[in-house]
Image (cartoon, rainbow, N blue to C red):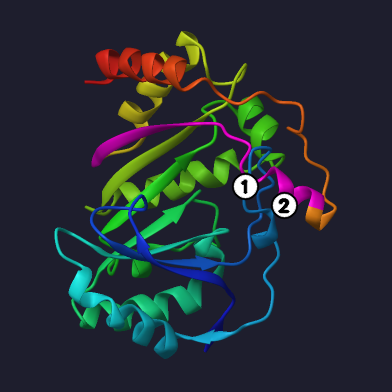
Amino acid sequence: MKGSVASIETFGLVDGPGIRTVIFLNGCNLRCKYCHNPEMWHMGDANYTSDEIVKRVLRNKPYFKNGGGVTFSGGEPLLQYEFLLETVKKLKKEGIHIAIDTAGIGLGDYQELFKYIDMVLLDVKHITKDGYIGITRRDYLDKYMKFLEELNKSDIEVWIRQVIVPNVHDNKEYIYGLSKFLKENIKNVKRVDFLPYHKLGSEKYVTLKINNPYVLKEEMNKEKCDKLYQEFLKDYQ
């Protein structure tokens, strides 16, 4: 079986604990306004077998100290479910720590996959239906909630990632709502990160000749983002 792989990063430091090999899988069924990887929206050609991925990862195994391992990102890795499942089974036999970076919008029936996953880096787009559609341009919040139900049946460690977009998430009402949402809907959350919206991927839209809905959107002020994070922690802890 082959999968569609966009790229492989060998020394990732921000996609889970320790030093990680990050496998970016093509394909995404969301169209987030702040997406910085629009080149991965479409599936593309199948170009790697699971054995080839395992071989690439094992080259870096000596560096996987202090909790390092492999992270499957994208795109949305859950859209290549069979390829992902086949690959993680082989990696788990090699004692590799496995994380997936996901928006939780895959093909359903995740329990078999969850047997081999150690960590989920989970994106939160928005906590209301209208807000979710406004960010992702897709009406998939119900699917996201079903993913959370499946995830909560496992004991997988969860790291939350919330992009903070100006005039969307940067207010106390949303921050307190996020705290309530996480407490009520997601267990095993060990870490929550606020990621200030940036425009580093803007040139990709020009190159790909894709309309950028946030072409005029200002970047999120990091200092304000940090202050909101501290407000969040006061309520969430």
Query: Residue 143 in the image: x percent, y percent?
Result: 55, 47
Q: Which of the two marks, 1 or 2, is nearer to us in this view?
A: 2
Q: Identify the disc placed on residue 6.
A: none
Disc 1 crowd rating (10 Å Cα; few below 14, some 14-19, many 20+) is some
Q: Disc 1 vs disc 2: Cβ atoms closer than 8 Å? A: yes
Q: Residue at 53%, 60% (x, y): give it.
A: 74
Q: Amino acid at mark 2?
A: Lys
Question: Looking at the picture, does residue 218 appear above or below residue 96?
Answer: above
* Label 1 sits on residue: 36
Q: Secondary structure at mark 2?
A: helix
Please state the extent of the stretch shown in magenta in the rendering: 188-206
Please give left or right for residue 20 compared with residue 82 in the image: left
Please give left or right for residue 202 compared with residue 191 in the image: right
Taking the view exactly as shown, the residue that stands out farthest to the left is: 66
Q: Quadrant of the C terminus?
A: top left
Query: Residue 11 in the image: x percent, y percent?
Result: 35, 64
Question: Looking at the picture, does residue 182 appear above or below residue 108?
Answer: above
Q: Identify the disc placed on residue 204.
A: 2
Query: Residue 118 in the image: x percent, y percent?
Result: 25, 60
Question: Looking at the picture, does residue 109 appear above or below residue 219?
Answer: below
